[in-house]
Image (cartoon, grey):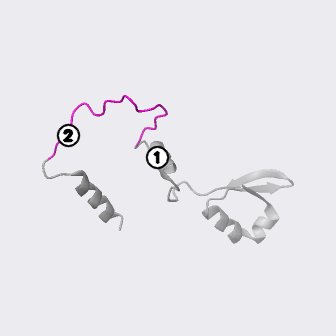
Amino acid sequence: MKAVGVKVLKARLSEYLRLVKAGEVVLVTERDTVVAELRPANRQNRAPADLGEQLEVLAEQGNATLRSESIQGWPGPREKLRLKGFSTQSLLDDIREDSR
């Protein structure tokens, strides 16, 4: 997190906006008092750095539930789902094709 005075921010606005776009939070100060905070917009799409961060993003969106307890002893799904003409491999191939 960086702090910058109002006068310096006005003189170097594009430099500080580049920092914000890169994910940095910039505190704006006036007479050594924080008066504003510049941060990336929530709508910016930034690729999660690792699997843990990806899972957290999915959980925030409501697309996953994170568990802290161990899954040992978990019996798995109660019933198996079988679909004709459908395989996990074909699903993965479709996902990979879409991301190209």
Secondary element under disc 2, as helix, strand or loop, is loop
- Residue 54 placed where, x, y %? 47, 50
Range drawn in magenta: 64-83
The quadrant of the picture occupied by the C terminus is bottom left
- Residue 99 placed where, x, y %? 36, 64
41 lies left or right of 34: left
Dot 2 or dot 1, earlier in sequence: 1
Residue 76's label in the rendered image is none
Rendered residue at 23%/57% (across/down): 90
- Residue on which disc 2 sits: 81
- Residue 58 placed where, x, y %? 44, 46
- Residue on which disc 1 sits: 55
Secondary element under disc 1, as helix, strand or loop, is helix
Count of numbered badges drawn on the protein? 2
Q: What crowding class fits label 1: few (fewer than 14 Cα within 10 Å), some (14-19), or many (20 or more)?
A: some
Q: Amino acid at mark 1?
A: Leu
The quadrant of the picture occupied by the N terminus is bottom right
Q: Please tell me whether the stretch drawn in magenta is mainly helix, strand or loop.
A: loop
- Residue 34 placed where, x, y %? 78, 51
Pick the front one: 15 or 63: 63
Pick the front one: 16 or 82: 82
Cα distance in 3D space between marks 2 and 1: 25 Å
Rendered residue at 46%/46% (across/down): 55
Pick the front one: 42 or 76: 76
